Each structure stands twice: as C-alpha cells, then as structure tokens.
Amino acid sequence: MVQEQGKLFETYNIGGHNEKQNIEIINIIIDTLQEMLPEGDPRKELVSKDLITYVEDRKGHDRRYAIAPDKIKAEIGWFPETMFAEGIRKTIAWFFEHEDWMKNVTSGDYQKYYEDMYAGK
C-alpha cells in the first residue's frame, strides 16, 4: 500500500496499535507456548516464567518499544489485520513448522557461513 499510495520520499511507521511493556510480551510468549506445546512434549516443562531474568536497567534502556502508526492509517488507510495475540500465536506456529530452519540458524553454522563469506572484506 505504501508503494502504491504513499508519497514519494515520505516515511511511514508501520505499527500494530498494541503498546506493551517488554515484560508483558515475554509473559504472553511463555503463556502461548504453554498453550501450544502438547502434553508430553519435554519442552513444555522447560518453558516457564522461571526463565525470566531481571537485570539492572542500563542507561537508555526502554521498558517498551512503541511506534505511532497514525499517519499511515490516515494517509493511506493501512491498519493491521492481525492483532498482537494472534500474531504471536501465528509466529510461534511458524517456528514449530520450521524447526529445521531454526536449528540451522541457532546451530552456529550460519555465523560460520557469514564469517567465511565476509572475512577480510
């Protein structure tokens, strides 16, 4: 929609109208994983709020990240079709369906590939 209806060289923030604190987001992710993991899946026992580690805030640390998407809605008519809770559920489902991709990215092979391809450049 931005490409078709936006103004040339204009900036549009694309956001979901879902301001949340960081702690709220991690709690939603943990709760959603608990709902989605089947009984008997050994990962279910590993996913809990015990994983949350609180650290001392650093200067400039944000408690939340927010974008004001009012302009894109007003000028172009864009708004999110998927709300946050549904989007998190879809995202987690995608990762469950693509565990092979996830293992490849987190195994360290990706970093080795990156280093090999761009070493010395």
Image (tube, helix red, strand yellow):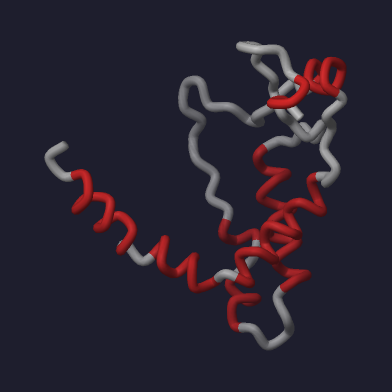
Is 83 placed above or below 21 here? below
Going by the picture, which residue comes out furthest to the front? 4
Quarter of the C terminus within the rendering = top left
Residue 43 in which image quadrant: bottom right
Please say if 104 is above or below 111.
Answer: below
Residue at the limit of the structure toward the left, as seen here: 120
Q: Residue at x 71, y 13 (%)?
A: 7
Residue 116, image x, y percentages: 19, 53
> Which of the two residues, 95 or 63, is positioned nearer the viewer here?
95
Q: How many marks?
A: 0
Identify the residue at image location x=59%, y=83%: 42
Furthest toward the bottom, the residue is 40
Which quadrant of the rendered structure holds the N terminus? top right
Of residues 114 and 68, the one nearer the viewer is: 114
Residue 73 position within the rendered picture, expressed as x and y whole percent measured from the top left: 84, 22
Relative placement, left or right, of 110 versus 50 is left
Q: Position of residue 69 (x, y in %)?
A: 77, 23
The percent position of residue 29, horizontal first and vertical second, equals 69, 56
Nearest the eye: 39 or 99: 99
Q: Locate residue 85 relative to residue 47 in the image: left or right.
A: right
The residue depicted at 65 percent of the width and 76 percent of the height is 44
On the rendered structure, is 41 left or right of 71? left
Residue 24 in which image quadrant: top right
Residue 62 versus residue 43 in the image, above or below: above
Q: Residue at x 54, y 72 (%)?
A: 99
